[in-house]
Each structure stands twice: as structure tokens, then as C-alpha cells.
Amino acid sequence: MPSGLRFLMAARRCEIEELAHLGRTVALVGCIGGLVHALQKERGLSNIFLGSGGTRFAAERTAQVAEAQAAEQAVRAALDRLTQEPQPPGSGTRLFNRVAWVLPGLDALAQLRARIGAGAVSPAQAAAAFAKLIGGLLAVVFEAADGATDPQISRQLVAMFNFMQGKEFAGQERAFGAAAFTRARADAELRPPWLHLIESQERCFEVFADFADETLRAQWQAAHGGADTAELERLRRIGCAAPGPDLDPELGPAWFACCTRRIDAMRVLEAQLAQGLRVLCDRKIAQAHAELQQYEALADGPGPAPQTGFFDDGDTGDAPAPASSAFGRQLERSVLDMVQAQARRLQAMSDELETVRAALNERKVVERAKGLLMAHRHLSEEEAHKMLRQTAMNQNRRLVEVAESVLTMAEYLPAR
């Protein structure tokens, strides 16, 4: 067998192994999407339940807990499948570290639910607990996107992560507004965090639109023009800009229902994203298997003659090769062509992958800069992001450029 062909086959087998691992990761991401959606719904119901002193949504909350538990079992099963199969070298380190961090949160859910049922936590505390757990689950999705080695799959994972993150901000807004309406308070301090949640959603959905395919992007744009969007904006204005300190508590269920319809519609699109990812993985695995079979068929043919076409650049003026060696020479040229085509394909994939990962790296830089400002300026996450955004606007620079500038000054900041 030509040595080049042998290693081409080995390269294809490695690619198939990496794609199979990526397929299991994509399946996990889909299950996480289902669990996050269930937890988001449970969080909103829990907020109204707590805000009303246990008089509202008790039965609905109980049913939602059961739904979330079923979704959790699906995630745990996907994790088992992911770790039971052999891992490609160098894959999964950060992903598995994220999983290890979030699993104790899933284990502690039963205790949190018991405290909510007993009214032993405030709506804000319950919302913060759910947000922390959901944030950990979304971090797993982020690492899945960051670790993907196929640019097409990576693009779709980036789109899905940002859509899920935007949907989580929408879920936080639902819980935030539900608590405000239920307790009939429109305090002045509610406005900045509420507006921050709205802005954060829009930022995530913009990145999603940049990376999603045309069909999903059109579906998302079409969803913005319905009656639910108009009703959401109306209730937002009441909650964010009420002239007095009191809100109508009867608007609480209306707010929750409106937000829920919107988030349920997002879940439909999110499920389509997950299904599209699974189909894409399956198609790429099938394609790699087909190419491997072609190589194997070529390898089963007659062996090559000793001469090679490696240094040939066309007609060298040499006498034609003997007929007995023609097939061997043709086979060597065929293998060389395949190697060169593979190299070009891998280089194109690498270039595209770098472009895709730039969006993820920008997020990392902004998050690190916010963390630095929060630690040294004693700011909240919202205040730190507002400072970065305002500086970017004032200096006519991109947000990531301002974040990079902040990080370069880290060594000059006073010790905490």
C-alpha cells in the first residue's frame, strides 16, 4: 500500500473519531437546551409562587418540577454516553471541567426546591440560584462551541450558544418582571437592571443572526413582528417607567404569560438549531466514511511501482514509463493529489474556524475585563458592562477593543 494513502486513511479515521465525539457533544447540547428551558420556566413559576406568599401557581410549579427532573435525567444520560466512549486526544478537558463544576448544582436542586416550597427564600434569592445553575449549563455549551474542530458545526454551535444565552436573559427578565408585578412595586432601582436585561438579549440575538443560517435568521426576524412583541413592549413600559411606586398585581400573570409565549417560541427555534446540528454531524460522518471506503478500495488494488511522481512538474522529457509500471505511477500521483486536496481542505477549515472562534474569544475578553472592573472598582456586572459600553461609544471603538485596553492595564491596578 502507498505510504501516503495509508496515512490518508489514518487521517480519515481520526476525523471520523473527532466527528463522532462532536456528535455526542452536540447531543448533550440539545439535552442541555431542554433542561435550561424547563429550569427557566420553573424559575418564573417559583418567583410568582414566592412573591404571592404561596397562593399562586403552586400546582403549576409542582408539574414543572417534574418536567425539569425528566429533562435533567436526559442530560445525565447524555453525559454518561459522552464519557463512556473513547475521547480523541486533547479533547474535552475544559468541557469536562465545566461539567464537573455544574453537576453539584444539579445535585442541590432538590434542597432549593424544598426551601422554595417552604417559603424559606426570597424571590430574588431563588432567581439568583436558578440563574447560577443555568449559567453553569450554558458555560458547558460555550465550551462545546469553543472546542469544536469543524468550522460549519462550530458556526452553528456559536449561533446556538448565543441564542440560548439571549433566551436566558429573556427568562431572567420574565422572572424579574413577574416578581415586580406580583409584589406591586416599581422602585426606581428596578429600571437599570431591567434595561440591562433587555440590552443583553439584543446583543446575543445579534451574534446569533450573524452565525445562523438564512432560514433560521428569517424565522427569528419574522417572530419580532407579532402581537406578543407589542404586548411585551407595553408591559415593559409599565414596569420600567411607571410614574408611581405601585404596580397592578393583576398584571403579573399577564406578564408571565406573554413572556412565556415568547420564550416557548424561542424554544421551538432552539430545538430546530439542535436538530440541524445533529443532521450536520451525521452528514459529515457519513461523508468521511464514504471517503475512507474510497481510500480502502484504492489500497486493495495493485501495489505501486518503485518510481514516484512527487518531483514531477509536468513533462520532463523522460521516456515514457514502461507499461508494467504505469498503474503504479498513476496510483502514486492519485495519492499525491488526494494529499494535496486534503491539505487545502484542512487549511480552509482552519481559516474558517479561526473566524468563527473570534466571536467566542471576544466574549472571553469582555467577560475578563468586566471581572477586573468588578473586582477593582467594586462594581456590579451590569455597572461594569455599562462602563465598557459607554467608553466604547465615547471613543468610537468596538467593545472588545476597550476590554482589551482594560486588560492591558491590569498590572497597574492596585492590589485588592
Image: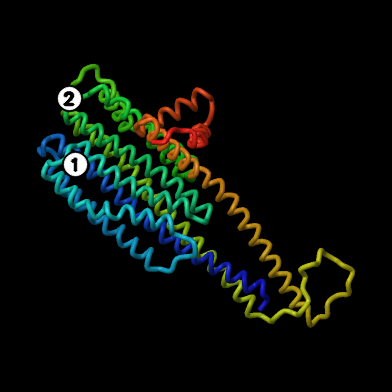
| Residue extending farthest front | 415
Q: Residue at x 47, y 60 (%)?
A: 91
Could you say which disc has been placed on residue 46 in the image? 1
Question: Which image quarter holds the N terminus?
Answer: bottom right
Residue, x 29% and y 59% (percent of image)? 74
State the image coordinates of residue 92 (x, y, percent, origin top left).
Answer: 44, 59
Closer-to-camera residue (90/212): 90
Relative depth, front residue between 245 and 111 = 111
Is 12 placed left or right of 325 in the picture? left
Q: How many marks?
A: 2
Cα gap from disc 1 to disc 2, whole angstroms: 19 Å
Q: Quadrant of residue 297?
A: bottom right
Q: Is residue 151 above or below residue 265?
A: below
Using residue 416 as the reference point, say whether residue 228 is left or right of it.
Answer: left
**In the rendering, at what x and y percent does residue 267 appear?**
33, 45
Residue 329 location, quadrant = bottom right
- Return the mark for residue 248: 2
What type is the residue that disc 1 sits on?
Ser
Query: Dot 1: within a 10 Å radius of its alpha carbon, few (fewer than 14), some, or many (20 or more) residues?
Result: many
Quadrant where the C terminus sits is top left
- Relative to 72, say whether 229 is above or below: above
Query: Can residue 270 be seen in this snapshot?
Result: yes
389 left or right of 138 in image: right
Q: Sort mark 2 into few (<14), some (14-19) or many (20+) by Cα contacts within 10 Å.
A: some
Task: Determine whether 325 is above or below 291 in the image.
Answer: below
Residue found farthest to the top: 243
Q: Residue at x 50, y 44 (%)?
A: 361
Name the secondary structure under disc 2: loop
User: Is residue 221 among what the camera can see?
Assistant: no
Of residues 371 and 31, the one nearer the viewer is 371
Q: Position of residue 21 (x, y in %)?
A: 45, 63
